[in-house]
Image (spheres, helix red, strand yellow):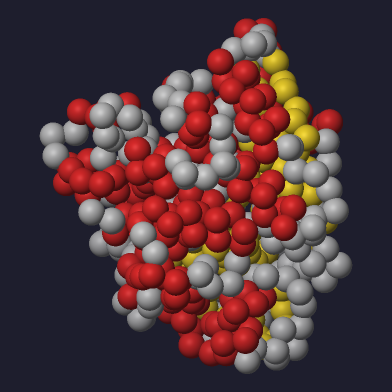
């Protein structure tokens, strides 16, 4: 979890020194910060707030390599197949930082080469000073955020959070009211004018910097922008999973277990302590149980911490307590009152950058729990169960779907929009306290396989939501039987 920030098309650097926009995302990366002006890209300024997770010594950004001195990278993300890419393409890494592979992939084949090969979550700004171009990218489910503002005068702002693009005092931004809002949100979530985003159906944009004029011009990606998820599928999405070679030999339930386990395993990549949110429901319980199991197998030098929040002796608290005892985690419980909610509400709204009632209501508990984790423990990387309800049809209303096809279509819609709701909530409430959230259910390999299964098998069965997911683990001792089949409860 880091904060990336950039301004292009400036007429002067003076405004940057008096502008507080860069510091507004300090919470995303409190370990170090850097801001740079690069004269090779006229009238530009880029900045980075770092939360050290991998390669704490040499992972500072903007990242530049001796091999490609004309490239600069800002990236908030985790690339889980960085080691495989090094072996596959014989890249010569200069650091131990996972995002370095983005620079090598770009140098070898441009933006499309990045898109075809990355397995992870990311939001990046890549500057090619030689060509005078800037490329921005975001992972398929929008797990890592990216916002953009554009002015008629040719100023472009790109940032991890909207508050970091709050430049109205410095520049006269024009907002078009006839834009396709969905497209704007799909492309870095907010800000922009119609002629930038119209008809773009992908998740990265091509931005050309005129090095002579120092102005910003935007247009379609020269390769032809396509949805990132589709590109992954075309490149053989299951092929990047080390366990994929055995999938055809196993049953569907075995494959689900294999891929979800692989998803959790790759998310243990960290030089900081790992913990898990544990609500007592199916999703977080599966993630926590797999995390503890894999951590023991990897001989991590600490016990996995799990965290639950709720009213004292509420059903969720009791269920989470039972799971923690079963899996052997170091369990922490946080109790809150109505007054705690009232006191936290303003801060929650500030970090969420939305007043959507459902999102705010679901965010308060996560915000309070994240605050506890930051203040009372040393866990920094946090695994969570976000995405399972959307992927595995976990919401109660899926029981009433007219047909399996309708249920599948609704699942796809929820996944397409997840970065606007649950994804946004998860990112903002944890990053507010400098925590890095990781979400195994939104893994590309796991989600691609799960969505490829027959539609009727993924529907609720006998009134039980997420029946297929539960069944996949029913003959294991990973969780207590009553937890595995416990019905979903609203927080």
Please give the name of the residue rendered at 70% of the width and 30% of the height, measured from the top-left corner. 325
Q: Is residue 50 left or right of residue 146?
A: right
Residue 252 x %, y %: 35, 57
| Residue 152 percent coordinates (x, y) | 43, 58
Q: At which x and y percent is residue 239?
A: 44, 75
Task: Give the answer, above or below, for where 232 lies relative to 357.
Answer: below
Residue at screen point 70% across, 15% down:
335
Residue 283 appears anywhere in the view: yes
Q: Quadrant of residue 65?
A: bottom right
Nearest the eye: 486 or 381: 486
Name of the residue lying farthest toward the left:
402
The picture quadrant where one finds residue 125 is bottom right
User: Measured from the top left, where is residue 363 in percent x and y?
Assistant: 56, 28
Residue 146 visible to the viewer: no
In the displayed structure image, the side of residue 341 where residue 329 appears, left or right: right
What's the residue at 23%, 54% (across, down)? Answer: 454
Total residue callouts: 0
Front-most of residues 446 and 225: 446
């Amino acid at each position: 979890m880091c904060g990336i920030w950039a301004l292009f098309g400036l007429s002067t650097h003076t405004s940057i020194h008096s502008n507080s926009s860069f510091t507004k995302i300090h919470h995303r990366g409190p370990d170090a910060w850097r801001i740079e002006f690069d004269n090779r890209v006229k009238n530009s300024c880029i900045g980075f707030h770092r939360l050290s997770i991998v390669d704490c010594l040499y992972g500072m950004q903007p990242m530049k390599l001796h091999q490609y001195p004309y490239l600069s990278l800002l990236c908030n993300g985790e690339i889980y197949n960085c080691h495989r890419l090094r072996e596959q393409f014989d890249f010569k890494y200069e650091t131990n930082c996972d995002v370095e592979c983005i620079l090598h992939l770009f140098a070898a084949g441009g933006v499309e080469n990045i898109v075809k090969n990355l397995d992870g979550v990311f939001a990046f700004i890549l500057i090619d000073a030689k060509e005078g171009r800037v490329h921005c990218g975001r992972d398929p489910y929008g797990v890592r955020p990216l916002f953009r503002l554009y002015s008629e005068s040719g100023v472009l702002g790109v940032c991890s959070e909207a508050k970091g693009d709050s430049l109205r005092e410095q520049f006269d931004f024009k907002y078009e009211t006839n834009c396709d809002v969905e497209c704007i949100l799909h492309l870095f979530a907010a800000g922009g004018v119609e002629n930038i985003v119209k008809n773009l159906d992908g998740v990265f944009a091509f931005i050309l910097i005129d090095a002579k004029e120092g102005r910003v011009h935007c247009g379609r990606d020269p390769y032809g922008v396509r949805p990132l998820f589709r590109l992954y599928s075309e490149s053989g999405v299951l092929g990047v999973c080390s366990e994929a070679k055995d999938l055809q030999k196993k049953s569907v339930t075995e494959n689900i277990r294999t891929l979800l386990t692989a998803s959790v395993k790759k998310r243990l990549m960290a030089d900081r302590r790992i913990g898990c949110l544990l609500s007592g429901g199916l999703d977080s319980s599966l993630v926590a149980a797999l995390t503890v199991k894999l951590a023991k197998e990897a001989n991590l030098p600490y016990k996995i911490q799990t965290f639950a929040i709720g009213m004292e002796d509420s059903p969720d608290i009791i269920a989470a307590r039972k799971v923690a005892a079963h899996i052997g985690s170091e369990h922490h419980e946080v109790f809150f009152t109505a007054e705690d909610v009232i006191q936290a509400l303003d801060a929650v709204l500030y970090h969420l950058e939305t007043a959507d009632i459902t999102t705010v209501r679901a965010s308060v508990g996560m915000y309070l729990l994240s605050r506890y984790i930051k203040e009372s423990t040393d866990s920094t990387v946090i695994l969570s169960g976000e995405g399972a309800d959307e992927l595995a049809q976990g919401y109660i209303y899926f029981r009433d779907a007219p047909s399996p096809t309708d249920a599948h279509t609704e699942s796809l819609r929820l996944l397409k929009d997840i970065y606007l709701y649950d994804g946004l909530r998860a990112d903002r409430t944890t990053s507010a306290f400098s925590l890095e959230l990781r979400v195994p259910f939104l893994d590309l390999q796991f989600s691609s396989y799960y969505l490829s299964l027959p539609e009727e098998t993924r529907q609720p069965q006998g009134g039980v939501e997420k029946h297929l997911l539960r069944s996949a683990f029913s003959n294991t001792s990973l969780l207590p039987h009553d937890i595995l089949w416990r019905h979903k409860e609203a927080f």
